[in-house]
Amino acid sequence: MNIYTTTKVFLIFTFLLTCSSLELVFAEKDTDKQPSDIYLEYLTTAQNAKSFDEIAPYWSGWMVDSVKGKSEDERNARLKRMQESAANKKDISVTGTEKSGEFWVISLSAVYPDGQKMKGQVKVFEENGKYVIEEEMWTADFSDE
C-alpha cells in the first residue's frame, strides 16, 4: 500500500469513528431526559399535533391501542380535545417527582385561561427503553383559596 491509500483508509476510519461517537453522545442526551421533561415535551407536541402519530411515541402501549380501530371522526375528535387540553395549561411547573414502584409520579401545577388553578399528576414509566405516559389526571386546585 502506498502512503496515499493508507492516508485515505485512515481518514475514512477516523470519519466513521467520529460519526459513531457523535451518535452515542446524542443518544445519551436523550436518555438523560427526566420523566418530567418527556411530559412537558408531550404537551408541546400535543398542542400542534396533526395526527396521533405525532403523540403516540409519548404514550404507553395500551394508550396507543386505545385509539386503534376507532373511526377517523372519533380519532379527530379525541385529538382535538387533547390539543385543547394541552393548550389550556398555562404556567405549568413541576412541583415534584417521586419514584413509586415502576412508575415516576410527576406532580404539576398550571393555570387555565379562566384563571382557575389546576394541579396535575402524571404517571410515567420506562417501556422499550424510553419514558412513556401511563396516566394523566388534572383537577382544580382549591388549596390557596
Image: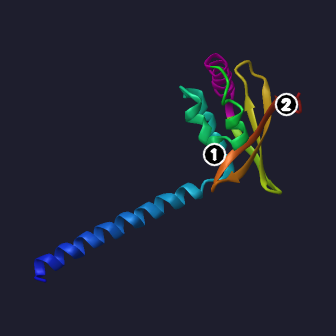
Q: Residue at x 83, y 30 (%)?
A: 139
For numbered disc 2, what is the local secondary structure? loop
- Number of marks: 2
Which residue position is annotated with label 1? 38
Which quarter of the figure has residue 56? top right
Left or right: 116 with respect to 32? right
Image spot of residue 72 (x, y percent): 61, 19
Q: Is residue 11 visible?
A: yes
Image position of 84 with respect to 9: above or below: above
* Image spot of residue 129 (x, y percent): 63, 56
Q: Which span of residues is magenta-colored?
A: 72-91
Residue 99 against residue 51 in the figure, above or below: below
Looking at the rendered structure, the secondary structure element under dot 1 is helix
Q: Which mark is residue 141?
A: 2
Tell me the chief SS of the magenta region: helix
Compared with 30, 142 (above or below) is: above
Position of residue 42 measured from the top left corner of the image (x, y, whole percent): 62, 38
The residue at the point 13 percent across, 83 percent down is 1
Q: Residue at x 64, y 54 (%)?
A: 128
Direction front: furthest residue? 69
